[in-house]
Amino acid sequence: MVDQAKADLTKRLGVDAAEVSVVSSEDVTWPDGSLGCPEPGMRYTQALVPGNRTVLEAGGKQYSYHSGGHRAPFLCEHPQPPSR
């Protein structure tokens, strides 16, 4: 998960992998199918979803990557906290 998130961020920012550091990576339980990253106007399954939250840092800014179910890590612009 961490490697996938880091690869996405380096490509997205156009920086070398050495410029991206891992702040944290933890297994979490998301409160619903939004995986902690709800979009306005969207509906999500109302069930607990096991997943992962990885926080990366580059250039003094932190980036939150969420995953869960069968979904690979994705950048979440407005992250919400997990259930636990």
Image (spheres, rainbow, N blue to C red):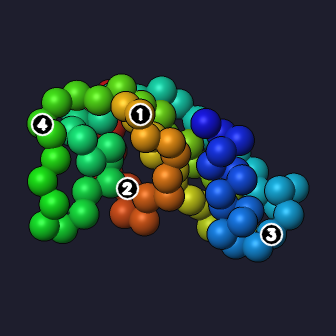
Q: Check disc 1 and give the amino acid type.
A: His
Residue at 80 percent across and 69 percent down: it is 15
Mark 4 residue element:
loop
Of the two numbered discs 4 and 1 on the same chain, state the one appearing first in sequence: 4
Q: Check disc 3 and give the amino acid type.
A: Val
Residue neighbourhood size for the residue with mark 2, other residues' Cα within 10 Å, grouped as few (<14), some (14–19), many (≥20): some
Of the two numbered discs 2 and 3 on the same chain, state the one appearing first in sequence: 3
- Name the mark nearer the viewer: 4 or 1: 1
Residue neighbourhood size for the residue with mark 1, other residues' Cα within 10 Å, grouped as few (<14), some (14–19), many (≥20): few
Name the residue beneath numbered marker 2: 79
The C terminus is located in which quarter?
top left
Mark 3 residue element:
loop
Name the residue beneath numbered marker 1: 70
Of the two numbered discs 3 and 1 on the same chain, state the one appearing first in sequence: 3
Vertical placement of residue 44 versus 28, above or below: below
Residue at 22 percent across and 28 percent down: it is 48
Judge left or right: residue 42 versus residue 79: left
Of the two numbered discs 4 and 3 on the same chain, state the one appearing first in sequence: 3
Q: Check disc 4 and give the amino acid type.
A: Gln
